[in-house]
Amino acid sequence: MTGRGTALCVDIGSTFTKALLVDLDQGRVAASASHPTTAGTDVLDGYDACRAELLAADPRAADAEVLACSSAGGGLRIAVVGNEELVTAEAGRRVALSSGGRVIEVLAAAGRVPEDAWERVVGHTTPQRGGGGGGGADLVLLTGGTDGGNRAVLVQAARDLVAAGWRGPVVVAGNVEAREEVAAVLAGVPHVLADNVVPRIGELAPQSARAAVRELFLAHVIGGKGLSSRPELTEMVRGATPDVVLTGVELLARGLGGRHPGAGDVAVVDVGGATTDVHSVLAPDPEGGQSREVVAAAPVSRTVEGDLGMRWSAPATVAAAGLEEYAAAAARRAADPAFLPDGAAEGDVDEAIARAAAGLALRRHAGRARVVVGPDGRVVERTGTDLREVDLLVGSGGVLRHGRPGVAQRVLGRLEEDAAAGWQLPRAARVVVDRDYVLAAAGLLAADHPEAAYRLLAGMTGTTGMLEGAGG
């Protein structure tokens, strides 16, 4: 039901729930609300408060279609098991991140896996309670072997996982010739068989595994965390928040085809209190044939930097950036995550921490490139995702949404020195801020209301060409 042409798009977080009432005909935000999430009682209490606020602002919220994403309860915690650290385990890590997961463990099963590593994955749960308890994973992504290659390691990894007591959901995305045997091993465990994430050396195929992660997240994780006693939660939630945001970024970059152009190559930097996430959607690399990579770079990717943030992770951020002069201020922020700047001096500190977190996160995501000459001639060695040709750089996070005028340019508009030092960072990107939190809403709307989602994104970027192309 589309409640008189509106949709209520909700992000249920661990600390705050944010909601937008979207006019589907016009593709614009009709009203917005946010409220602390009461994860200690019922996460839907925050949703109820947001809905009441939206109802007071616009009566159409009463019967609006409700679409939600969630990062509550620690988000989607994924453990990745692959054959080799630099091939299938690394491929699995990239796919897990692009699926909206927080990767808590990466194991290379072809080597010796420490016994306590399996315990960290399982979280010391008993076979009756299943995975995810005690700080373990919510889901395991099991990869290994190219198609037609080694089967034994993937099968043995499945056996070891079950023997360790894992009873949570598993996505199997390894050698397709081993799937039947692996499925037999996992017969008592919820699992989905996906296509191999590394069907051949040098090729990364994430789509099938991403869809499988989404399916199991909805079926087993959201309802299994005890976040709410109300059945509406599982009915509302369409995916993990980072996965939904990345869907919005894909729509922003690629458009809808025809008269609905995309913005080109796009990168998004979300500076949070505990983590800084980078999402990127790029056109295929024209130098791909000259690149030396065992696992190909994915055009759609995401990285999560758990040591970079504005509050909980502020001390680690200033330490990593060498900003010793801000150590005391960072410690105050970590001790009081609700801290808000109360003057120009504290505002300057917040911007310095944000600039450090965003810059470090972008460098880690983008990596470096260098030309080397070997037996095969000239090749490019890369360590990340090449962002040099990014057309649009989108900032997100409270420090950018609610900061002082010009904050986005001060935090994100000074990448020239890093680019000159060899980092593959944007060279001439336009910088905008997702002030109304529309990337998540667009991701929620993309499947059923693509035109409205597209118009939301066009409005966020102020791209008149996109709006004119939308027509009607």
Image: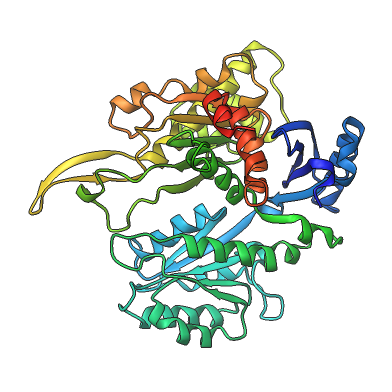
Q: Is residue 302 visible?
A: yes
Q: Which image quadrant for residue 273?
A: top right
Residue at image x 63%, y 52%?
A: 447
Q: Is residue 233 left or right of residue 447?
A: right
Q: Position of residue 74 (x, y in %)?
A: 66, 53
Tell me if residue 272 can be seen.
Answer: no
User: How far from the left and from the top, in percent, is residue 260?
Assistant: 53, 37
The percent coordinates of residue 242 (x first, y second) are 59, 48
Rendered residue at 49%/65% (across/down): 208
375 over 26 or under it: above or below? below
Residue 5 versus residue 96 in the image, above or below = above
Horizontal side of 418 relative to 44 (left or right) equals left
- Who's the residue at 38% across and 76% down the image? 175
Compared to residue 124, the image places residue 18 above or below, namely above
In depth, the one of 78 and 456 nearer the eye is 456
Apparent side of residue 263 relative to residue 227 in the rendered image (left or right): left
The quarter of the picture where the C terminus appears is top right
Q: Say if 203 sits above or below 167 in the image.
A: above
Residue 293 position within the rendered picture, expressed as x and y whole percent measured from the top left = 27, 54
Instruction: Report the residue at 78% width, 31% height from top.
Output: 30
Q: How many marks?
A: 0
